[in-house]
Image: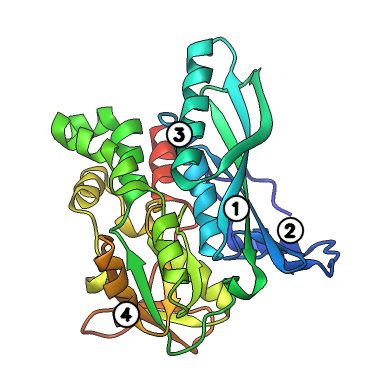
Amino acid sequence: MGTDPLPVGKLTPEFLARLLGEGARPDPRVILGPGIGRDVAVLDFGDRALVVKSDPVTFATDELGWYAVNVNANDIACAGAEPKWFLGTLLLPEGRTDEALVARIFGQIREACSAIGASLIGGHTEVTYGLDRPILCGQMLGEVAKERLILPTGLRPGQAIVMTKAIAVEGTSILAREAADRLREAGCTEDELAAGAARLRDPGISVVAEARLLASLDMVHAMHDPTEGGLATGLWEMAQAGGVGIDVCAGDIPIDPLCERFCNLLGLDPLGLIASGTLLAAVTDADAAVAACRDAGILCARIGTVTESAGSVRGQCGGRREPLPRFDQDEIARLLAEAD
C-alpha cells in the first residue's frame, strides 16, 4: 500500500476496484452493487426496485444546491428510475457562513427538486472547521418497476452509442464560474463568461428529461451520465461495466464551441472535462433514438458502436483506431492542482 499523497479527484479505478472487492458480503436483495461504471445501487423491493445514489459537489461553489440535486438525479434516471427523494449533508466553512448563504443553498436544492419532481426529505447541515468553501454531499433515491430497470451491464456488441447535447456542459459552467479570472486574463469577454455560466441551466446539467424519453422507447440497454473525467472516461466506465469495447468517431462528438474555447485558453482537453448534462446511451436503433430526442428539442448524435473488445475504448475518424485517453484526474481537478 503506497504512502504518497493522492492527487485531487477520484481514486484510480484500479485502487477503487480493490477497495470495493475487499470484505464483500453479497445480499440477495442487492440487484446491483458497487463496481466501476456502476453509479447507483439497486435493491429489490418486490415488484419495484429502489435505486440509490450518493455524490458530492466539490468543484463548484456557486449554485451548489442546483448541482447537487441534478448530478444525483441524473444517475437515478440513467437506471430508468424516477428520482424521488433527496437528502443532503451540507458542510459549511467556519467564519465564512451566514444565514443568507445557507438559505440560498437550501433554495437552490428546493428549486432543483421541484424541477424534476423530487422532494427534499432530510440530511444534515453544520458549520465546521478546516473548510475554505461549502461542500454538499447529496443522496438521491428513486424507484422503478423491476421490468423497466436499465442496468449498466446491458451493453452488447453491435449496439450503437448515442449522446445528447454537446460536451462539456457542466465543465463549461464551472470554468466560467470558478476560473473566471484566469479566463479573463487569457482573453475571454464578460459576455463569454456569462454565456458559459448560463450553461448550468441552459441547456442544463440535468439529463432526466432525455433519460425518461429514451427509456420509454424500449430500445435502450444502458445509460450513463459522464461526470469527473469527462466523456472519454464515461465511455471507458460504460465499457468496464458492460464487459465490452466501444469504438467512437471523434469527429462525430459534438463539442460546445464555448467549451472548446475555454479549454484551448486554459490548456485543457474537452474530452476529460466533467460532463454532467450529456447522456450516453447504448441503443439498438440509433436513428430512432436520435430522431426522438431531436423531436423533443434535445440535440442527439450517434458517436460510436459497442464491440467485443472487452474494456477497450478506441477513437477513430477515417483513419486507424487508437485508444481513447482515460482521465483518472478530471481536467478541472488538474487545473486546480496546478493553481496551488
Disc 3 marks which residue? Answer: 111
- Marks 1/4: CA–CA distance: 37 Å
Q: Secondary structure at mark 1?
A: loop
In which quarter of the view is residue 24 placed?
bottom right
Identity of the residue drawn at 46% across and 59% down? 225
Q: Quadrant of the N terminus?
A: bottom right
Q: Secondary structure at mark 3?
A: helix
Residue 108 drawn above or below residue 261: above
Q: Is residue 27 visible?
A: yes
Q: Quadrant of the C terminus?
A: top left
Query: Which x, y percent locates residue 168?
Result: 32, 53
Q: Nearer the viewer, mark 1 or mark 4?
A: 4
Q: Amino acid at mark 1?
A: Leu
Query: Which x, y percent locates residue 106?
Result: 52, 26
Q: Amino acid at mark 2?
A: Leu
For the residues bearing labels 1 and 3, Cβ distance under 8 angstroms? no
Mark identifier at residue 211: none
Identity of the residue drawn at 41% across and 66% down? 213
Local packing at callout 3 (Cα closer than 10 Å; few below 14, some 14-19, many 20+) is: some
- Marks 2/3: CA–CA distance: 36 Å
Disc 1 marks which residue? Answer: 11
For the residues bearing labels 2 and 1, Cβ distance under 8 angstroms? yes
Disc 4 marks which residue? Answer: 288
Q: Give the mark, 3 or 4, whose residue is nearer the N terminus.
A: 3
Q: Nearer the viewer, mark 4 or mark 2?
A: 4
Between 243 and 204, the one lying in front of the other is 204
Q: Is residue 117 left or right of residue 121?
A: left
Query: Which x, y percent locates residue 127?
Result: 63, 17
Mark identifier at residue 19: 2
Q: Secondary structure at mark 4?
A: helix
